[in-house]
Image: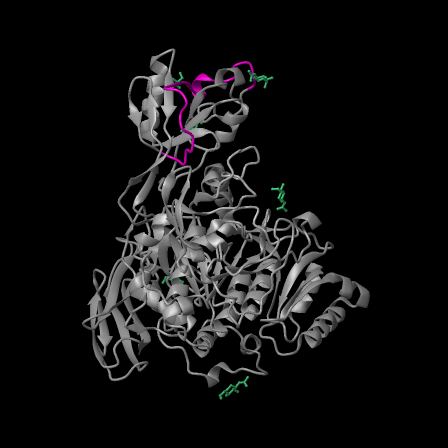
Amino acid sequence: MGSRVMKLSQKLPFLATFLCICLNTATITIASSANERQVYIVYMGEVQEERTILMDAHHSLLTETIGDEKIARDSKIHSYGRSFNGFAARLLPHEAELLSKKEGVISVFPNRVQHLLTTRSWDFIGVRKELKRNYLIESNIIVGLLDTGVWIESKSFNDKGLGPPPRKWKGTCVKGVNFTGCNKKVIGAQYFDINQRITPEEATPVDTEGHGTHTASTAAGIAVEGASLYGIGEGTARGGVPSARIASYKVCWGIGCEDVNILAGFDAAIDDGVDIISASIGGMARSLTQDPIAIGSFHAAKKGILTVCAGGNEGPDMETIQNVAPWILTVAASTTDRRLEAIVKLGNGDTISGMAINTYEPQKEFYPLTSGAHAGNVSGDILGNVSACDIGTLSADKVKGKIVFCQGAGSETIIQDLGGIGTIMTYNDNPDFAAAPATMGSYVSFGGGQRIEKYINSTSSAQAVIYKTRAVNAVGPAIASFSSRGPQALCPAILKPDLAAPGVNILAAYSGLTTLTGQEDDQRVVDYNIASGTSMACPHVSGAAAFVKSFHPNWSPAAIKSALMTTTKRMKIKPVGAELASGSGLIRPMAALHPGLVYDVDTTSYLSYLCKQGYKDSDIALLMGSKSFNCSNIPQAKGADGLNYPSMHVQVNSTESTISATFYREVTNVGFPISVYKATVKPPKGLSISVTPDILIFNHLYQKLCFKVTVTGGFSLRKSWYLSGSLTWTDFRHRVRSPIFVSPYTTLYS
Ligand SMILES: *[C@@H]1O[C@H](CO)[C@@H](O)[C@H](O)[C@H]1NC(C)=O
Ligand SMILES: *[C@@H]1O[C@H](CO)[C@@H](O)[C@H](O)[C@H]1NC(C)=O
Ligand SMILES: *[C@@H]1O[C@H](CO)[C@@H](O)[C@H](O)[C@H]1NC(C)=O
Ligand SMILES: *[C@@H]1O[C@H](CO)[C@@H](O)[C@H](O)[C@H]1NC(C)=O
Ligand SMILES: *[C@@H]1O[C@H](CO)[C@@H](O)[C@H](O)[C@H]1NC(C)=O
Ligand SMILES: *[C@@H]1O[C@H](CO)[C@@H](O)[C@H](O)[C@H]1NC(C)=O
């Protein structure tokens, strides 16, 4: 724990500029003591009564627990009840404990704060602008985003040519400061502040952070020609489904995204009639019945709504993946074929390639250059690392008016505050994404940094210039280093992330109520901004899912997910992780329109899965909204994972040397009515895979056929800590690929 916290805080300044509010740090618990009331969520499963009856029931439950009617009334802060049953209340720890044992209660958990975790990007994954679309159906699709709100003034949300909202839409549009109403593109906007943290002036659905505008336009923004950030990354900015509608649920504020608000967002979105829910939010993994995103997305899935989530930005460390519930589509971030380069030129003519979003065009040929090592404050008591330009170590008069070179990153604002005009920093890990320093600046490799230092040391009049960023071609795609990796401990047999989508240097619409860097003294207010994170990858998949749905309106959430997963492109992974970093691979939305076969999952299958996972009959009954439930009365989940998942994963004990695992699967024919599919396996080294039957003969559409996959053999996970193989079903037209992945149980490699 200690070392993890250290690591985060060391990384923080660097990442903070990179991912700004998309940064996905550890979950914060609001501190409490035994006699201090704290907000808890009491989760009670499916809605079984009318809202008024339900509210009375919440009240009686609280009175019964607390023992005082008035305190009980004051303690309740919100009743959910449109899409699931539950409430939020201020409780003492022992009251929370008591409540968790009451009949009808599935779980009681403290309210925590979670965090928010393009132009070329859609072309990159094969969705061309000129594509023939199902406009009529697409314009009936509503993508709901749980985020920081939306800045409707953006050109990306112009509603020209769109008809009135789809008839099924039941949502509302709340007005507020800087938000005068919705249009036919952004048809819904609400904000949730259950815990009453904001001031009345802040009570508005408008996006003051930029994140929500960025994600919404990536998923469903219209095409806007000539969009760029100061000319960087110029092209047509557009979402995956330009005719679809956007419903914005503001659940994240300055401090982050509180559980109580996330649940309120789901409660509303599901009932309002959205088709896809996109949540670029994450936090520490928690049990499925104590995680607001797992709870909300379960109720969404039951109503036929797919929830797409960011997988987290804590890579390349293993076991960092978030939002792992099997009904969620969990997204990793990949690079594209574009790199943002900000070149540094030294007074001696040497040029060093750097990476950054540097919007400043140099006004002079050269500027004076110094380094932290040469600008130390010799008269002060220096505590800290002067070469790294730590706070308090530099002398303002040696920095003023100069470009300053520092080892490591994170001191950009310190230099700026001391009057420096530019920064050159070295990056620590694998820099596959570009940060935006507030002043002129770039990030160079360690080797590049050495060259700069040597030059500074060699002359008394060092000088340098940093050129404005330009986009250059790069080899892609690769999984971004920051993208969280599996395996996961919560549902260990399910391979997560599920797939990857572009999440690096993504240009998309931004809010006019913030600045490029989010810093107040930054003068740059931008219509389009470049951001990186699994936050940016997530809405690409939400858009792709909506796109698939516009061609197949009746497909279940699991079928859409399967179509996206089995048609991906395999990826190179750096530095580590294989399928634990990429899942099935990079999305190819065009291929997902015609997957051939899908691995479907209905609600009953999720329930047998939960039975197998050891969830109590009574809790499952509440999830379903039925009087009673008996795991023995539904088909038992079979096999190594117990779910008809489009990928296969087995975690084994690293002390063992043989493996034998069986997966039971069922595929539904969505290709040609009469078709024959043949299985091809690529077994991992040392293992053998058998598929029975290995030929599937379909004679009508939507026909379902079963098969089983057995993985056996001897192996050593000590030699290679994972084993990677695949199964592909092919007819003459389709390729339906599932990774088969073997990894060890524990923390072998951390
Ligand atoms: C509303 O817009 C004004 C002017 O841009 C800005 O100063 C203010 O902070 C905004 N308030 C909110 C809550 O968005
Ligand atoms: C050097 O440090 C001292 C003490 O910390 C401080 O008072 C002084 O202003 C610093 N000098 C410069 C030039 O920054
Ligand atoms: C100062 O920081 C740099 C960059 O993080 C590091 O390489 C160097 O070893 C540090 N120096 C000291 C004396 O701690
Ligand atoms: C440059 O000079 C500084 C300060 O004297 C020293 O710490 C550093 O190691 C030198 N770097 C190189 C690459 O020569
Ligand atoms: C569940 O069903 C099985 C078989 O139908 C039965 O034996 C068992 O008693 C039931 N359990 C409960 C708690 O009703
Ligand atoms: C792995 O095997 C060891 C030794 O046989 C055993 O102690 C341990 O409990 C096993 N771990 C798991 C997760 O099965």
Number of on-image labels: 0
Q: Which stretch did the figure color magenta? A: 355-381
Q: Residue at the location (46% across, 56% down)?
A: 322
- Residue 58 image offset from top left, x and y in percent: 70, 71
Residue furthest left as drawn: 732
The answer to whether residue 58 is left or right of residue 221 is right
The answer to whether residue 704 is left or right of residue 220 is left
- Residue 115 image offset from top left, x and y in percent: 53, 51
Q: In the image, is residue 361 part of the stretch drawn in magenta?
A: yes
Q: Ligand 1 quadrant? A: top right
- Residue 225 image offset from top left, x and y in percent: 39, 48
Q: Which colour scheme is used?
A: one colour
Q: Can residue 410 be seen in this view?
A: yes
Q: In the image, is residue 435 part of the stretch drawn in magenta?
A: no
**Looking at the image, which is closer to me, 396 or 494?**
396
**Looking at the image, which is closer to me, 503 or 525?**
525
- Residue 480 image offset from top left, x and y in percent: 36, 47
Residue furthest top as drawn: 460
Considering only vertical position in the picture, is 572 above or below 463? Answer: below
Considering only vertical position in the picture, is 320 above or below 70? Answer: above
Q: Main secondary structure of the magenta part?
A: loop
Q: Is residue 317 visible?
A: no
Report which quarter residue 187 is drawn in.
Answer: bottom right
